[in-house]
Structures are given as C-alpha cells and as structure tokens.
C-alpha cells in the first residue's frame, strides 16, 4: 500500500481524498494555488505545497509543478480527483515515467476512450449500442452522410463536455455554419477543434453506470445513476436507482458497461454514460475518472469508491463480484450546490461566506470545502457543496431532500439551493417522468428563488 499520496486537485474532492487517506493510514499532500490559500483541504492534509498563481493553467494544470511537488514531498502516488488533469493520458504517462502511481486508468485506456469518437469505436467493437452518427471526427464534407443519419442531428466536441462545442442542426442549410461554430468553440475550450455528429434524441434521459476494474481482469458494474436533470448540459441532480429503468434494462446496461471496460483494457473506477429513450439505451461516452456524483453510488451500493480506487491502484483485487456490486440498499439523490445567482442567469457568485448553516440528521451527507468566513475565488468551478440524501425509497428521499435543502443557510453569496428545492417539489420530478429538457419545459429558470440560502 502507498505511504503518501499527493492530491492534484482542490476544493471538496481534495477533502474527500484526504479523508480516505486518513482512514487508510496514508499520508496526504495537498497542492494549492495562490487563490486557494484559505481552502479547507490545505489545513486537513499532512503537507501542503503552493504550485503557482491563481489561473489553473499556471497551477492545477501545470504538470511539471505537480510532479515536482510529488518528488519533493516523497509521495509515491498521485490522485487527480476530477477535472483538471484527471483524464489527461499524457499526465498519467508522465507520472509513471517519474516513478509515481497514477490513481486512475492506465494512459492507453484513457487514450482509447478520451475522445468521444474513439470511445464510440470501442463501444461498437464491444457490441454496445450507440447513437447513429458519423464514424470518425469530421475532416471532409459530411452532407450526404448526415442526410442518411436524418435530421435533426447534434454536433459534439470530441475532446470535451459540458455543452461546449455542441450545436443542434435541424435542416441541411444550417450544417456548415454550425460545424464551424462548434469547432471554434471546441478549440477555444479544449485546445482541440475536432467534432463529430450524432442523431439527436429529442426526449432522452441521461443514465450512467459506475464501473470498477482491477489489474487482474475483474470488472464490476454498479446500479445506474440518473443524471437527467441538467441545465445547459451541466448536471444538477443525480439519483439512484433511476425511476425509469427496469431491472432487465439495468442488467443489460451493466453487462454492456463491463464489455466496454474489458474491450478497452480499462482499470480503476470510471463511468459509462448512456442516453435512454423509449426503452432503449445508447452509449455516449466514458468518463475515465471519478465522477462528481460518485457519492450516490457509494450510498446505494454501500461501497467506499475512493478507498476502492486507491486499493486498485496499489494492485489489490476487487473485494467483491458483480452480484455484490449490483446491490441496491437504498435510494439516493445528490444536489450540486453552486455559488451562482439563479435570478441572474446563474452568473457565478464568488465572494465571502458571511455565515453558514449545514443540514444534518439521518440520511444527510454534506461534502464541502467551504466554511463560515471563507472567500470563494472567481477562478474555478462554482461548486461549493454536495448534499447526498438517502432513504429507504424515492418518496422518502424526496421529502428528506426538501428538509435538508431548507436547513441549508448560506449568507453573503447567492447559491442554487433554492432551485434544487423547486426541482424536488415539482410534480413532474415527483412523478419521475422527465427528460433532459425538464428545466426548460417546466420554466423553473424563470422562477425567482428567494430564501435565506439565496439571500446575501
């Protein structure tokens, strides 16, 4: 087992890794930028190293600074968290070349799956259903190919996500202009302008399968997470099990995810994402890292995924098989609480937290790095906390969510907590019959939030 792990990340995910290290008797090293000197993860770690100025490209994305910090502190492994360098195959390769274990998939697996179009090719080889689309990244005129796919279609960036480089095309006359716009946006966001095209599903759910694979060829797949409630292709609420997935479909999705992992030579934890519509599921991509919403699976399966990641990276075998992984022990929902102003087009709301009251009680978990008096920097993602709510069934979990969201009080900044309360209380969400356009269809973006948790 490792003696010391450097966490190449910040905020709540760094706190999560440090806690796992402490429970496992492993020393931890935090890294931070100048803007993060007050972050909780610095005080929690056994050691902390400043790796550069506030901009992420000069700190959290500076591979050499991170590798130097690992060497100088005597770390023998590096955990990338999510975001930043977590899916960077070159960084994983550099870790290996410098003698550090990268706690994540091997670089060759990341390269196979890191681009959406490449992941689609692996899926086809593994006999996993995919959305009809172009075979490769677009390099030539694809007008005829798109006509065969059938409009409407969706242009997607090969190298990224979050809605960047994504365009809907409903008629042939729009195709070339939208291709250019999508490629330019993808280039600006990810440094790579490659795009591809898929048939647009109009009423899909976004459902994903968490996998874990050890270095000995063993792979398991957990129960699904439903991430359908989104805003601008960014997930807001995640739950498990999905109210739309039957046990039969669940098994088929798990088997497909396992085939994909084995075909690609995947190791460690990861997520296989699908679109689900009219009783059928279609592969869209693999997130070759830990997900923000991993606590949902931890709750439902009763498994510590962070500990599992570390043990797999150290060479341990999976401690259980598929039957144990597939167990559903409760219902769980995660609410991503962001420092954003819902009444002002969800503009980021950095600033000082004047006071903070966190919810508690049975079935309530809070993952956060913030505290009363903490100043949220303007340079990074606006996520400040995750509320993970569990109960025996979905109805009980929704009631508990409303209670916990009502207890959350954040003053000094605006947050999205009020929006989450509106989502949970909405009859369509309560019924469980919704798609990825739920927020727009219900007009929740037009509702004023109010409440102590949203008032400065």
Image (tube, rainbow, N blue to C red):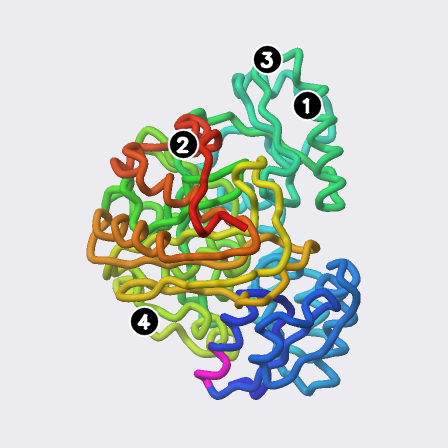
| Residue beneath disc 2 | 438
* Local secondary structure at mark 2: helix
**Highlighted range, magenta:** 20-24
Q: Position of residue 408 (x, y in %)?
A: 41, 57
Image point 76% across, 45% down: which residue? 191
Could you tell whether 400 is left or right of 341 in the image?
A: left
| Prevailing secondary structure of the magenta residues | helix
In space, the residues marked 3 and 1 are separated at their CA atoms by: 11 Å
N-terminal label among 1 and 2: 1
N-terminal label among 4 and 2: 4
N-terminal label among 3 and 2: 3
Q: Position of residue 292 (x, y in %)?
A: 49, 57
| Residue beneath disc 4 | 320
Is 95 part of what is drawn in magenta? no
In space, the residues marked 4 and 2 are separated at their CA atoms by: 37 Å
Res. 54 image quadrant: bottom right
Residue 255 visible in the picture: no
| Residue beneath disc 1 | 178
Query: Contact (CB < 8 A) between labels 1 and 2?
Result: no
Q: Position of residue 229 (x, y in %)?
A: 42, 40
Report the disc number at residue 129.
none
């Amino acid at each position: 087992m490792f003696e010391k792990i450097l966490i190449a990340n910040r905020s709540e995910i760094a706190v999560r890794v440090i806690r796992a290290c402490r429970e496992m008797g492993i020393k931890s090293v935090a890294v931070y930028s100048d803007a993060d000197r007050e972050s909780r993860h610095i005080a929690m770690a056994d050691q902390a190293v400043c790796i550069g100025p506030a901009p992420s490209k000069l700190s959290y994305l500076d591979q050499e600074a991170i590798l130097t910090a690992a060497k100088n502190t005597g770390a023998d492994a590096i955990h990338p968290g999510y975001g930043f360098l977590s899916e960077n195959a070159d960084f994983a390769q550099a870790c290996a070349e410098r003698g550090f274990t990268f706690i994540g998939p091997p670089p060759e697996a990341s390269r196979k799956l890191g681009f959406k179009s490449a992941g689609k090719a692996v899926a086809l080889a593994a006999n996993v259903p995919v959305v009809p689309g172009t075979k490769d990244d677009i390099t030539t005129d694809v007008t005829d190919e798109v006509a065969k796919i059938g409009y409407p279609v969706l242009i997607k960036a090969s190298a990224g996500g979050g809605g960047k480089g994504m365009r809907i095309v409903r008629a042939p006359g729009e195709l070339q202009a939208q291709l250019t716009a999508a490629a330019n946006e993808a280039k600006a966001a990810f440094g790579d302008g490659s795009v591809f095209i898929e048939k647009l599903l109009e009423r899909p759910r976004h459902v994903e399968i968490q996998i874990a694979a050890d270095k000995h060829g063993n792979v398991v797949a957990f129960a699904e997470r439903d991430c359908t409630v989104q805003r601008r292709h960014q997930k807001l609420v995640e739950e498990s099990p999905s109210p739309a997935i039957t046990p039969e479909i669940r098994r088929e999705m798990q088997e497909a995810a396992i085939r994909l992992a084995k075909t690609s030579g995947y190791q460690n934890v990861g997520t296989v994402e699908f679109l689900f519509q009219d009783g059928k599921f279609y592969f869209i991509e693999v997130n070759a890292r830990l997900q923000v919403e991993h606590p949902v699976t931890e709750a439902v399966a009763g498994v510590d995924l962070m500990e599992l990641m570390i043990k797999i990276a150290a060479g341990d075998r999976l401690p259980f098989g598929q039957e144990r992984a597939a167990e559903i022990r409760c219902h769980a929902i995660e609410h991503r609480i962001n420092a954003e102003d819902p009444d002002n087009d969800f503009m980021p709301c950095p600033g000082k937290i004047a006071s903070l009251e966190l919810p508690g009680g049975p079935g309530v978990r809070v993952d956060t790095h913030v505290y009363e008096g903490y100043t949220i920097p303007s340079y990074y993602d606006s996520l400040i906390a995750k509320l993970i709510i569990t109960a025996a069934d979905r109805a009980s979990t929704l009631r508990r969510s409303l209670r916990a969201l009502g207890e959350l009080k954040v003053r000094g900044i605006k947050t999205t907590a009020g929006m989450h309360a509106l989502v949970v209380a909405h009859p369509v969400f309560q019924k469980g019959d919704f798609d990825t356009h739920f927020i727009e269809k219900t007009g929740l973006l037009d509702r004023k939030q109010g409440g102590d948790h949203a008032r400065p």
